[in-house]
């Protein structure tokens, strides 16, 4: 997946650097290099990985359409606050929650059957364990809240930039995503300091 080389290089540089402060050697903290190239689909409102040269599979039909905002998502190795257990689906490219040990619903057909569970592997990669901040458990102020978990498909979707009844499509039943039981998740734009 994208930024693995960058993340490893940042960690090596941070781990190798020493600062002298008042005569004591202090090892720098590990760098936090969240993965970018996550985008919002304009039709289903799901968060999907845009960096694989594929547009995945959209439950609103055909492939995902990119909204144009480059979001960052942390992995467990990045540390910090948030909820672990989020995964990337190697078939539809969406971010989905595996922390409840269910595979949700993926819009990409598997063995000819649509609506089967998400996969944690893709053509050439296995999913990282992603961590999402929410408004009560985050690293710092700022970011963009209003991202929700859908209990029907296990996906993360944008509940702010659309009507709750139109403009979003869940792969489980082709109806709107559900807000039931969801936290209010926070994403940060790539290159943002907030």
Image (spheres, rainbow, N blue to C red):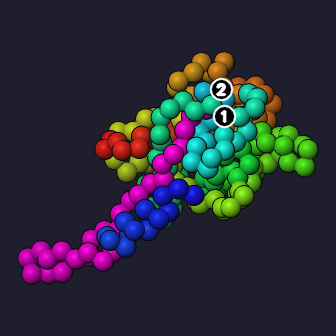
Between disc 2 and disc 1, the foreground one is 1
Left of 74 or right of it: where is 179? right
Q: Position of residue 180 (x, y in %)?
A: 65, 33
Q: Residue furthest left?
A: 22
| Residue beneath the point at 48% across and 48% down | 36
Q: Quadrant of the N terminus?
A: bottom right
Q: Is residue 107 visible?
A: yes
Mark 1 surroundings within 10 Å by alpha-carbon count, few (fewer than 14), some (14 through 19), many (20 or more)? many
Observer-nearest residue: 20 or 91? 91
Magenta residues (range) = 15-41
Mark on residue 64?
Answer: 1
Q: Are marks 2 and 1 in contact (CB under 8 Å)?
A: yes
Q: Position of residue 116 (x, y in %)?
A: 83, 45
> Does the segment drawn in magenta span residue 21?
yes
Where's residue 127, x and y in %?
64, 59
Is residue 74 visible in the rendered image? The answer is: no
Residue lying at 66% horizontally and 18% vertically, measured from the top left: 166
Residue at 50% x, 32% y is 68
Q: Which residue is mark 2?
A: 43
Q: Find residue 138 and report its horizontal and vertical position in percent.
A: 41, 48
């Amino acid at each position: 997946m994208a930024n693995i080389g960058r993340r490893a290089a940042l960690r090596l540089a941070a781990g190798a650097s020493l600062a002298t402060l008042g005569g004591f050697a202090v090892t720098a903290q590990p760098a936090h290099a969240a993965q970018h190239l996550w985008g919002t689909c304009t039709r289903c409102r799901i968060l999907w990985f845009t960096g694989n040269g594929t547009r995945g599979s959209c439950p609103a039909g055909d492939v995902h359409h990119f909204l144009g905002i480059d979001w960052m998502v942390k992995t467990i190795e990045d540390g910090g606050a948030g909820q672990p257990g989020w995964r990337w689906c190697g078939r539809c490219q969406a971010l989905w929650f595996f922390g409840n040990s269910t595979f949700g619903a993926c819009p990409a057909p598997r063995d000819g059957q649509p609506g089967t569970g998400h996969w944690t592997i893709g053509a050439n990669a296995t999913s990282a364990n992603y961590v999402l901040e929410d408004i009560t458990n985050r690293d710092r102020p700022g970011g963009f809240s209003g991202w929700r978990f859908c209990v029907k498909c296990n996906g993360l979707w944008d509940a702010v930039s659309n009507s709750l009844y139109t403009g979003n499509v869940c792969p489980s039943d082709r109806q709107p995503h559900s807000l039931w039981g969801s936290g209010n998740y926070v994403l940060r734009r790539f290159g943002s300091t907030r």
